[in-house]
Amino acid sequence: MDLGFAGSTAVVTGGSKGMGLAIAETLAAEGASVAVMARSRGPLDIAVTALRAAGAPDAVGISVDMADARSITDAFEMVSERWGRLNCLVHTIGPGDGYFEQMDDAQWDEAFAVGTMSGVRSIRASLPLLRSADWARIVTLSAHSIQRQNPRIVAYTAAKAALASVTKNLSKSLAKDGILVNCVCPGTIVTASFTEALKDILAAGGLDATDPVDVMTWIDDNFHQPCDLGRAGLPEEVASITAYLASRRNGYVTGATVNVDGGSDFI
């Protein structure tokens, strides 16, 4: 299926690793020129090399502090100078986690600065560019925990729930401009950072943190949150649906919150 990305431009925030990089690589392979935004220069440079190999010779990595409003504005000014327009923004940034009793006000402020306001600021900065394009899409990444609570990630979940709400609201206000706006909610996804953080913990129980079935076994044992498919997901499985929602091919899906979680019964 041709998603219509040929000749288009895209920004993926958090695009230097994990799900963000998988999304950026998918857009590049579909023919988009891709700018990835993240904090660290090293991972950005590696990501740009991968994107160029995937099919985006004009790929660029922009170092940005997603907790800083001015840094975000400056980053999108660079996009404006480079392309003058933007067809799609995919925002994947998320905050840290922690239990309620462990978090002070500064940590809550940081969670919302990164988990919610980075999305608000990125969308605000990108809107003139999106309106300058002949078609435009916005996709944000929230989390399945906004529907299936986990005490270990209380501030993360609250910030992501706010982002999902903003996303749905924007689908209404931007419909008149022909800008389609959707939200993707990944479940447990086996990324490199996930594996690195939990490999020793899972190994202590005889489990492999790179194995999607073992990962879901650990999730079920410790958090009692299994999924119908019995395994964790992969970054490319999030990337495929995100790419469709961000594409020209998507002409009628807007205001949706799409779960990519292997199946769960949400109440």
Image (spheres, rainbow, N blue to C red):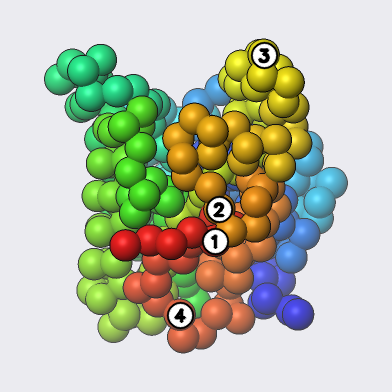
Which amino acid lies under the numbered mark 2 shown in the image of this protein? Answer: Cys
Q: Quadrant of the N terminus?
A: bottom right
Question: Which residue bears the numbered disc 2?
Answer: 227
Tell me if residue 143 comes above or below residue 115 in the rendering. Answer: below
Q: Residue 130 bears which disc, if any?
A: none
Residue 43 lies, in percent from the top left, at 66, 26
Residue 145 lies, in percent from the top left, at 38, 46
Give the Cα separation between the discs numbered 3 and 2. 23 Å
Q: Are marks 1 and 2 in contact (CB under 8 Å)?
A: yes
Question: Which residue bears the numbered disc 1?
Answer: 263
Q: Which dot, 4 or 2, sits closer to the camera?
A: 2
Residue 220 lies, in percent from the top left, at 54, 39
Which amino acid lies under the numbered mark 1 shown in the image of this protein? Answer: Gly
Q: Are marks 3 and 1 in contact (CB under 8 Å)?
A: no
Residue farthest to the left, as pictured: 105
Residue plotted at (75% across, 36% down): 211
Task: Looking at the image, tell me whether mark 4 or mark 2 is earlier in sequence order.
Answer: 2
SS at mark 2?
loop
Q: Are marks 4 and 3 in contact (CB under 8 Å)?
A: no
Give the Cα separation between the discs numbered 1 and 2. 5 Å
Q: Is residue 253 visible?
A: yes
SS at mark 4?
loop
Q: Is residue 133 visible?
A: no
As drawn, is 225 to the left or to the right of 32? left
Q: Is 19 or 12 nearer to us in this picture? A: 19
Question: Which residue bears the numbered disc 4?
Answer: 253
